[in-house]
Image (cartoon, helix red, strand yellow):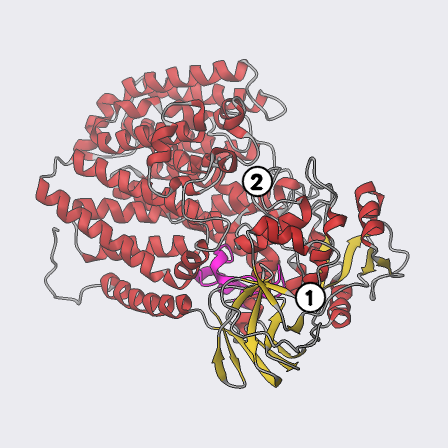
Amino acid sequence: MLLVVGVVALFWLVRIVLPTKPYTFGSIDPYLLFLPTYEVAYRWLASGTLPLWNPYVLCGIPWLATLQGGFFYPSHVLYLVLPGPLAMAASGLLHLVFAALTTVWFARQAGLGSAAALLAAVLFALRGILPNLVYCPPQLEAAAWLPLGSVAVLRLAREGGRRPVGLLGLAAAASFLAGYPQTTTYVVYAWAALLVALLLGERAGPRRWIATWVLFAGGLVLGVLAAAVQLLPALEMTQAGTRAARQLDLRTMFPFGGPLGGSSALPFLAREAITGSRFSFGVVGLALVPAALAAHRFRPLVLWALVLGALTVAFALGPLTPLFSLYLALPAVAWFRAPSRMLLVTEFCFALLAATGLEALGSTNAGDAGAAAYRQGPGAAVLALIGLAAVMVLVFAGRATAGSSHPALAVGAATAAVLLAGASGGHQRRRRHVAVTVVALAALEPFLAPPPDARLPYHASTDALYRKHSAAFARLAALTGPARVWVFNREAVPEVAAKFATLSGVRSIDDYEQVNLRRQSDYFTYFAEGSTEMSREPWVFGGLVSLDGARNAARPATRRRLLDLSAVRFLVLQEASLRRAEVREFLEAAGLAPQSSLPGEEPTSGEDRLVLFENPRVLPRAYVVYRTRPAPPADELLGRMSQESFDPLVESYVEGDPGFIPAPDAPARGIAAEILRDDPRVVELRATAAAPGLAVLADTFYAGWQADVDGRPASVVATNHLFRGVPVPAGMHRVRFEYRPASARVGTAATGFALVALAALLRRPRQGAPRRSGT
């Protein structure tokens, strides 16, 4: 265990922390999404505020329901006690160590020797996709529980009982709470396939199959219930979100081309997965995979790893193979983009195959099993040499992407020498020396691969860059008041991350969020493209990052009225963005007035200086309107609302009954309402109505928002597509909006029940108590 921790820690330091190249597009997510999300969410939690609703982006979003914050994930307590960058670094290291240690545990429970178990940990935790998931923390955190759940499945198949059920429930709950359901879905399928292989290997009878599957399902159900505090709000959001729980079309499933384009997946597997890059399986591991065929004692494990590994590779290739129709038929997996993310499961299978191949060399066990392995060792070594030869052919063919094939060739030559020594026979002690050398070569390979192409926000320099404009954003929050801003970040640079508005308490209309509401997507996509449907990759709304407009559509400036409606008072951007013709065109056509500089910014700080433009035609965020009209379909409605002549204080569009009867003598135009309280989950207005009307708040309409007028419950209606309104009688009234989602309350109760049940299942039996086994 100490050796595993030491090797993983050394790898993490040398290959992940020390590289100091600038950030790139491939490493931007920690800056734009994860670090600001974690920092602000746990700042709220520390102050006693649950992150149920975020009012600072996209006119408000059900934040807990977006999942990727993983707000209740246990290890995120680090963000309560450490600075954000340090907590992210510590979490990445801990999860790599945890994945490695639990891989060792699974391999040992499966009967593999210590050297083989160590090899499995090295190949899974240090090579391929897993260590590169530090750029996507929730994906790493969700994936790290794959080996522990596999331990639970192994024990469940062999002995049954309550503790494996509890262990499975714990692994499933933690993986779900991490906030990356796509990875968790793949992990659950891997566990289910492993259970099938183990029961087939033991030739279990029908009653054993039924009993074991009932326990397996019970463990998963407890895991889901334990994560219900996050999953139920997310399920509620799917009813109104852009990412509904249904099969995606192929264009959305492959947002950046990929296998749908017909060719990019195969070169990736040849260049990246075979050998040469930091994503590759590695020469040593690939050489040992054929030797696993000689490990007859581990046939169920080998067959599971071979079949599942091959299937996941085929699925990752997308429509290039006929097996993709099976992928689309599997429940839940087709809900997610980029099926290539399931290569993580492939690599776990690969690591176990290589470890089993090493075991087949007859070098790590003792006793009768060791004697059998000793006899099969030469045959396994021959298979390994054949596998190594095939890998070397690929290397010589120029498939390595390390900049040079020399490291792969050197490791391959050393591996060949070791395998030849193993094939020549000898004492068990000599074979153990062979195993140790093979493991050492496998551990060396990750250090020879190219380093990551960009640094993470672990460094003081990147942290300083990330916080460069913090003073300016604080001033902007005071300057803006209850109105909103648009922080335009066309270049996707960390120092102007959309979520920095949330950190600073600035209400923004933009966000970099993977999951959002359909109403938000319709509204802002229509502003950017003149249609509610995205016309460019990634085919789902991910923020206002372009002013180019869609093909055959008018420029966004012609729809600038939508900015007025959402109370956008200021546009903030880096001075470098002014070099873009489309930006200058938009500013001029939209009539935005330039300010000298953003308060808190030095006027001579260069092209990364923030500049401020004011919208002179901004509408109030809260107002009273006396006339309404039924809302037409979204595209037609947004087309009408984007017209310069549309005035929501004269007439607004509502969905359903507005809740009042317009008075014939009502004023022609309503008036602004005063915002008295403006907290994340509570907004209070003082609305003065000359006649019965609708008090409108230009914040997102969503289930869970409840309202009262002067203390009496009132209905909330969707107004002007994105916003919410409450009917009020004539006179002065106090209107209160409060976010009280039933999904969060029910989810909290379910989580509490499941945690008690899991604790009871995992509790050790009292000393002297009879131990029950079986199913």
Q: Position of residue 327 (x, y in %)?
A: 36, 33
Q: Position of residue 260 (x, y in %)?
A: 51, 27
Quarter of the view holding residue 477: bottom right
Which amino acid is tagged 2? Trp
Above or below residue 639? Residue 726 is below
Range drawn in magenta: 53-82
Q: Residue at x 77, y 69 (%)?
A: 475
Q: Residue furthest front?
A: 664
Asked if residue 719 lies in the magenta stretch, the reply is no
Above or below residue 542? Residue 362 is above
Q: Residue at x 23, y 55 (%)?
A: 218
Q: Which residue is mark 1?
A: 506
Task: Name the residue nearer the viewer: 671 or 236.
Answer: 671
Q: Secondary structure at mark 1?
A: loop
Task: Name the residue nearer the viewer: 329 or 564.
Answer: 564
The numbered mark at residue 539 is: 2
Q: Residues within 10 Å of mark 2 (few under 14, many from 20)?
A: some
Above or below residue 656? Residue 493 is above
Of mark 2 and mark 1, the one earlier in the sequence is 1
Look at discs 2 and 1 and give the one toward the viewer.
Answer: 2
Q: Is residue 362 left or right of residue 257?
A: left
Task: Name the residue nearer the viewer: 700 or 710.
Answer: 710
Q: Residue at x 70, y 39 (%)?
A: 553
Asked if residue 59 lies in the magenta stretch, the reply is yes
Q: Is residue 694 among the parts visible in the rendering?
A: yes
Q: Position of residue 6 (x, y in %)?
A: 48, 47
Give the spatial CA distance, label 2 vs label 1: 28 Å
